[in-house]
């Protein structure tokens, strides 16, 4: 028997922007004067601006920013897009531990979704993660695989739609597996402007899935463009 369509009083979309702040991010991109970190700093405002162009998304978005190197931490926690004042300054340092990032993302997703759902009849869209890296992890394959599997397991109620964006000299063969099946994408590009363009292609899908009255809790969502992987659905406790 199929699930009944559920109507919520309010709905939210948790969006997690995960930024590589390892020492390798100070390397320059090709022959340009721009470092990978500088390219990354251009992307976050572009994401917020793209979200603000769509009032439906802007009203429901709850934004968090996580930075990682050897360890990972959340430096912006569940703010509205309209109230986002930028990412606090931070230095690039240390190695690149994807496992630390994946573990932190899972923890922050659980915290955010539980907090949002404390109110009665509130719907939470499946969280979306934008993961930015130069694609040079230093942790072990075993640690990366274990934490990635925990984050994307079907047993994890709040498993996210996961998009990985490689910048600088990122190699796709290193990061190609870090997407959430058909609900994610891996994109590699040296120029931050091209990465920003890819994100702008994803934003309308987020909006479409929010405004669609036919999306029910736990459903497969909708597909708009098969070239940009994008199914978004609600997260339900029994999904």
Image (cartoon, grey):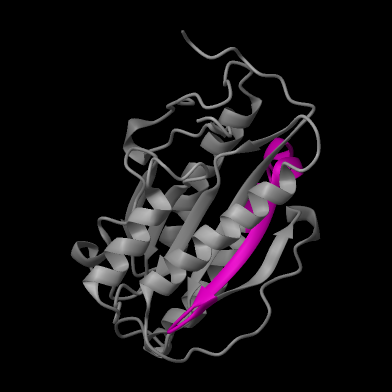
Residue 75 visible to an observer of this rendering? yes
- Residue at the location (77% across, 29% down)? 121
On screen, residue 43 versus residue 35, left or right, reads right
In magenta stretch: residue 86 = no
Taking 2 as reference, is 42 above or below it? below
On screen, residue 48 versus residue 227, left or right, reads right
x, y percent for residue 144: 30, 68
Of residues 65 and 207, the one nearer the viewer is 65
- Residue at the location (79% across, 54% down)? 82
Q: In which quarter of the image is residue 4?
A: top right
- Residue at the location (50% across, 41% down)? 157
Of residues 185 and 52, the one nearer the viewer is 185
x, y percent for residue 179: 34, 51
Of residues 168 and 129, the one nearer the viewer is 129
Q: Quadrant of residue 11?
A: top right
Taking 88 as reference, is 234 above or below it? above
Q: Outermost residue, left direction?
A: 173
Of residues 34 and 23, the one nearer the viewer is 23
Residue 52 visible to an observer of this rendering? no
- Give the magenta range: 48-72
x, y percent for residue 42: 55, 71
Number of numbered callouts drawn: 0
On screen, residue 51 versus residue 149, left or right, reads right
In magenta stretch: residue 62 = yes
């Amino acid at each position: 028997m199929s699930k009944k369509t559920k109507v919520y009083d309010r709905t939210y979309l948790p969006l997690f922007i995960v930024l590589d702040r390892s020492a390798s991010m100070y390397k320059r991109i090709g022959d340009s004067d721009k470092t990978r970190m500088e390219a990354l700093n251009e992307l976050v405002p572009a994401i917020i601006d793209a979200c603000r162009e769509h009032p439906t998304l802007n009203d429901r978005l709850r934004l968090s920013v996580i930075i990682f190197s050897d360890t990972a931490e959340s430096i912006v926690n569940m703010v509205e897009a309209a109230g986002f004042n930028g990412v606090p300054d931070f230095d690039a340092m240390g190695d690149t531990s994807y496992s630390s990032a994946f573990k932190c993302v899972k923890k922050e997703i659980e915290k955010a979704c539980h907090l949002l759902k404390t109110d009665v009849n509130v719907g939470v869209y499946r969280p979306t993660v934008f993961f930015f890296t130069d694609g040079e992890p230093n942790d072990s394959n075993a640690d990366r695989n274990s934490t990635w599997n925990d984050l994307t397991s079907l047993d994890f109620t709040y498993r996210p739609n996961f998009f990985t964006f490689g910048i600088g000299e990122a190699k796709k063969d290193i990061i190609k597996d870090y997407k959430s099946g058909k609900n994610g994408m891996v994109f590699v590009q040296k120029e931050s402007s091209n990465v920003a363009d890819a994100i702008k292609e994803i934003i309308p899908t987020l909006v479409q899935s929010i405004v669609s009255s036919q999306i029910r809790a736990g459903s497969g969502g909708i597909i708009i463009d098969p070239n940009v992987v994008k199914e978004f659905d609600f997260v339900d406790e029994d999904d």
